Image (spheres, helix red, strand yellow):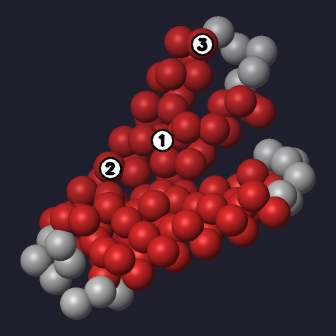
């Protein structure tokens, strides 16, 4: 459970590092966005690397990756809708269904 919580927290940082500059720094030069994004991503790595190290052994490498993709979508959709003001699309549901299939196959015995 600790691994999942840390991966979720790290993904919040990474989502902001990857996409928040599109809203907050759109008038700034691209290199400013890079420096700010790297600064945010630094904190993501401080959480993500220990999370993967804790989880590896309990989970396989494939399970960690698929778990991260599910968490990414779970973090990205609210971020896109509430922070970036994007419309909620049915495509997010279909993407979630595809990821549910991936979870089934990677976690089955």
Q: Which residue is drawn at the image coordinates 40% and 51% (left, top)?
A: 44
Q: Where 106 sits versus 22, above or below?
A: below
Badge count: 3
Label 2 vs 3, first from the N-terminus: 3
| Residue under label 3 | 30
| Residue under label 1 | 40
The circle drawn on residue 54 is none
Q: Which residue is drawn at the image coordinates 20% and 78% (left, top)?
A: 59
Foreground of the two, 54 or 70? 70
Say few, some or many: other residues with alpha carbon within 10 Å of mark 3 (under 14 / 14 to 19 / 20 or more): few
Q: Is residue 74 visible?
A: no
Foreground of the two, 79 or 29? 79
Left or right of 109? Residue 105 is: right
Residue 52 falls in which quadrant of the image? bottom left
Label 3 vs 1, first from the N-terminus: 3
Q: Are marks 1 and 2 in contact (CB under 8 Å)?
A: no
Q: Secondary structure at mark 3?
A: helix
Q: Residue 14 placed where, x, y %?
A: 49, 48
Q: CA distance from mark 1 to mark 2?
A: 9 Å
Q: Which residue is drawn at the image coordinates 77% and 15% (left, top)?
A: 27
Q: Where 15 sits versus 63, above or below?
A: above
Q: CA distance from mark 3 to mark 1?
A: 15 Å
Label 1 vs 2, first from the N-terminus: 1
| Residue under label 2 | 45
Foreground of the two, 4 or 36? 4
Residue 33 falls in which quadrant of the image? top right
């Amino acid at each position: 459970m600790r691994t999942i919580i840390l991966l979720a927290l790290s993904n919040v940082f990474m989502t902001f590092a990857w996409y928040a500059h599109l809203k907050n720094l759109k008038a700034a030069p691209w290199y400013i966005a890079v420096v700010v994004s790297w600064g945010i991503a630094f904190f993501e790595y401080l959480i993500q690397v220990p999370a993967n190290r804790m989880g590896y052994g309990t989970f396989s490498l494939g399970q960690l990756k698929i778990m991260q993709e599910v968490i990414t979508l779970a973090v990205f959709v609210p971020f896109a809708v509430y922070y970036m003001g994007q419309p909620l699309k049915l495509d997010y549901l279909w993407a979630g269904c595809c990821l549910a299939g991936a979870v089934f196959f990677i976690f089955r015995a």
